[in-house]
Image (cartoon, rainbow, N blue to C red):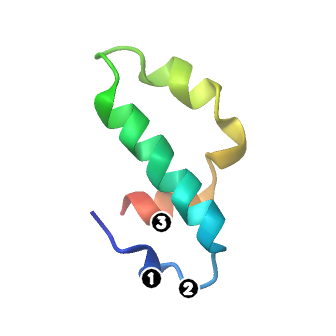
């Protein structure tokens, strides 16, 4: 996983929220990813993609 320090311009709370969402996606049963993402649309942005990289 990419270190949150790579995303210098991001607020630390936002990075933690991204990491929490990523963990939820990793832990969920296969096929439930779209519902999880739909429930967290405010976090699905360019910063989320950067953290995922």
Is 20 left, or right, of 25 in this rendering?
right
Q: Quadrant of the N terminus?
A: bottom left
Q: Residue at x 30, y 16 (%)?
A: 29
x and y percentages locating residue 48 in the rendered image: 54, 56
Residue bearing the label numbered 3: 50
Q: Secondary structure at mark 1?
A: helix
The reply to whether discs 2 and 1 touch (Cβ–Cβ < 8 Å) is yes
Q: Secondary structure at mark 3?
A: helix
Distance of label 3 from label 1 (alpha carbons): 11 Å
Residue bearing the label numbered 2: 8
Residue bearing the label numbered 1: 5
Q: Is residue 2 above or below residue 5?
A: above
Is the residue marked by circle 3 packed among few (<14), some (14-19), or many (20+) residues within 10 Å?
few
Q: Nearer the viewer, mark 3 or mark 1?
A: 1
Distance of label 3 from label 2 (alpha carbons): 11 Å
Answer with the quarter of the image where residue 52 lies.
bottom left
Q: Residue at x 32, y 69 (%)?
A: 2
x and y percentages locating residue 30 in the rendered image: 28, 17
Q: Residue at x 64, y 26 (%)?
A: 39
First along the sequence among labels 3 and 2: 2
Label for residue 18?
none
């Amino acid at each position: 996983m990419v270190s949150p320090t790579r995303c210098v311009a991001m607020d630390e709370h936002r990075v933690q929220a991204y990491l929490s969402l990523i963990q939820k996606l990793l832990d969920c049963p296969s096929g439930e990813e779209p519902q999880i993402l739909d429930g967290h649309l405010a976090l699905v942005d360019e910063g989320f993609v950067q953290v995922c990289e």
